[in-house]
Image (cartoon, helix red, strand yellow):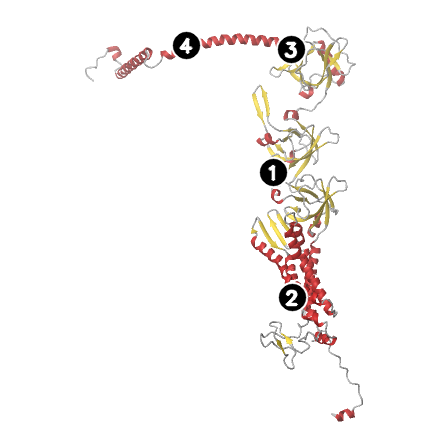
Amino acid sequence: MSALNPIALEQGLQSCHGCGLLSRPAAGAEEGRCPRCDEDLHFRKPKSLERTLAYLMAAAACYIPANLLPVMVTNTAGGSESDTIMQGVVLLWSPTGWPLSLIVLFASIMIPSAKILALLYLVITVKRGSIKNNSQRVRMYRMVEIIGRWSMVDVFVDTFTVALIQLQPLMSVEPGPGLLFFAAVVVLTMLAVESFDPRLIWDSANANEIQNEVTNA
Amino acid sequence: MPDNEKTFPPVPAAKTVPKKRTRLSLVWVIPIVAAAAGVWIAVTKILEQGPEITIVFSSADGLEANKTKINYNGLNVGVLTAIRLMEDHKRVIATAQMNPKAKDFLVKDTQFWVVKPRMSGLNISGLGTLISGYYIGVQLGQSKESEHSFTALESPPLSDNIPGRIFTLKTSELGSLGEGTPIFFRKLEAGQVVSYELDKGGKFLNVKIFVQAPYDQYVNPDTRFWNASGVDLSLSASGLRVQTESVMSILAGGIAFETPASDAPLSPADAGAEFNLFSDRTEAFRPPSRNPHTYVIVFKQSVRGLEVGAPVFVNGINIGEVTAINPQFDAQKVEFTVPVTITIDAARYGVKFLNLPEGEDAAASNQRVINAMIAHGLRAQLKTGNLLSGALYVAMDLHPDASPVTLDWSQNPVQLPAMPGQIEAVEDTALNLLKSLDTTLGSVRGTLTNADKVLGDAGTFIAPNSMFNSQLDNLLQQGGGAAKALRVLADYLERHPESLIHGKSGEAKP
């Protein structure tokens, strides 16, 4: 494989994360800076798997209160009512409103959990040095990267509603504590995606010593 | 350096252990913080949760899980979390999550009820629930015993905060009374009807009333309660009298109470004491029966207009009332007879007995008196008490020429002799009266026509520009002149009184 696709790492070259410029590492120092865009240069993202795992665990920890706590508290003259995300899905579910309900269900409940699970799968397979389905796994990583940010839609909708519906004393909407955790889930999964280096997927296919060298670096 | 190596005995070289990467990356702070936040939220959630209770309601109408709140004095102390049908499919049982601070509420006699808009009488309450939806009201119990399952009241209890007492009134019918019907004391609103329920026997109703302080101290065992609903119209010798407690009681009904004046002040009645609810004030203040005797009088004439409760008069004094009318038909004689049962209780109606022989048995004394009166010709008759309504009453009058009768005292009740027909005579008289009234009216009409004519003449007589009028004018003018002359004469005489004797002399020299 390495014969067919020469890898920068094997050649002792570093590729810049920012501009992609290939450069020789500074003599005597492992970490230098990109001569073109002044970005820090690494062979691979530092502590990629460890950081990704940490972010994932944080996201998973936040995912539970995000779904159990109310995200929106509606105060009407009659009293206040707090809804969790799932209650919102149930509330929206009607013969005409079911597409909306599905959007909320996908964007707010399934995508964050799918993201966490997918990244966890990637981290585990890379750690175990799996060489199967490499292109599938990279595709999965890209999907996660692209689709993940759309979970933030829920947070935006909630904040807009809170800002717009302030008809004191008739009616007002306040963000619930769940919203904070939900936003944390979205941000943390995005950070996890960011800290994961997809090149690690391919590195597993290379010789073990190189692998060790990379992870030790 | 090489010398050193030689001089020292061979020593094992220090092991070089590759530096272990023990330092955890800082990034792990993030999941730790996240987990800590999650745990903290969970702990506070659990701490926030108070005890869970169940409340049984007769209906889940207006109740919603996770929405219906439990409020104490307007403060939220819990929320219903689940509502489901009970096993008997008749009532609903609701699970409620109470606030941890509401622990003190959960005692045996704490009461729950649904607060919803209520209109009773003229009182409207719970209007706020029209917007906010129903909520559960709580009244704190006094008991020390802890309890976690309750049965909700059908209607709100009276607040403990208002001092006063609850009494029970017994009545045969509810009339226009209802929850919230006001109670009046001397036309002041003194309380209200709390609830009512049918007695177990179904014969009468128990109406629970709440008389608030300070009026409750005027309720003593002798207090009379009566239904003050509507207007009391009474026509008496002094004219038409309208009596009502208040405009409110006309619209919504009411109960009034009063305590008859008594010599010895009675101690206030105990809370929960029972009273009779009378239909009106007169009924309420009628003296209680003292020494009633029941008799029966058999009438053979029409008893149309005679009702149970009709008075019995002796010499125009009310001494009793009709208690039953039981018509009979004798198939052998082919005739209707109407035995009318009356109760005579002279003492009740304020008749004072004088010269009663002392030491005599009351029954024997009564028998002797009745016998003597019958011997003197006491007979019962039906008389019309009210010409308009045709209501009859039983009149017991002395008819000395009546044929003698002996009473059979072995019977119970004893039959008193009756005298037939007085009504027909009365009717005849009334008819004659009406007839003569008719002829009188005819002549009155003629007289009126004549009077009319005379008045018409008089009208033309004194009309302006008529002969009479101008003559009258002249007459009055002349009269005025005469009066003036008289005044001149009087003046002159005052100044010259001697002129009466000497004549008018000083005319020449004024």
Disc 4/disc 1 C-alpha distance (Å): 67 Å
Instruction: Indicate whether B60 appears above or below B247.
Output: below
Is B123 in front, or is B368? B123
Closer to the eye: label 1 or 2: 2
**Dot 3 falls on which chain?**
B
Q: Name the residue under label 2.
A: A191
Q: Say left or right for A127 vs B423.
A: right
For the C terminus of chain A, the quadrant is bottom right
**Dot 2 falls on which chain?**
A
Is B452 in front, or is B130? B130
- Residue at left 64%, top 9%? B424
The reply to whether residue B369 is visible in this rendering is: no
Disc 1/disc 2 C-alpha distance (Å): 60 Å
**Dot 1 falls on which chain?**
B
Q: Mark 4 points at which residue?
A: B454
- Crowd class of label 1 (few under 14; some 14 to 19; many from 20; radius 10 Å): few
Q: Which amino acid does label 2 sit on?
A: Leu
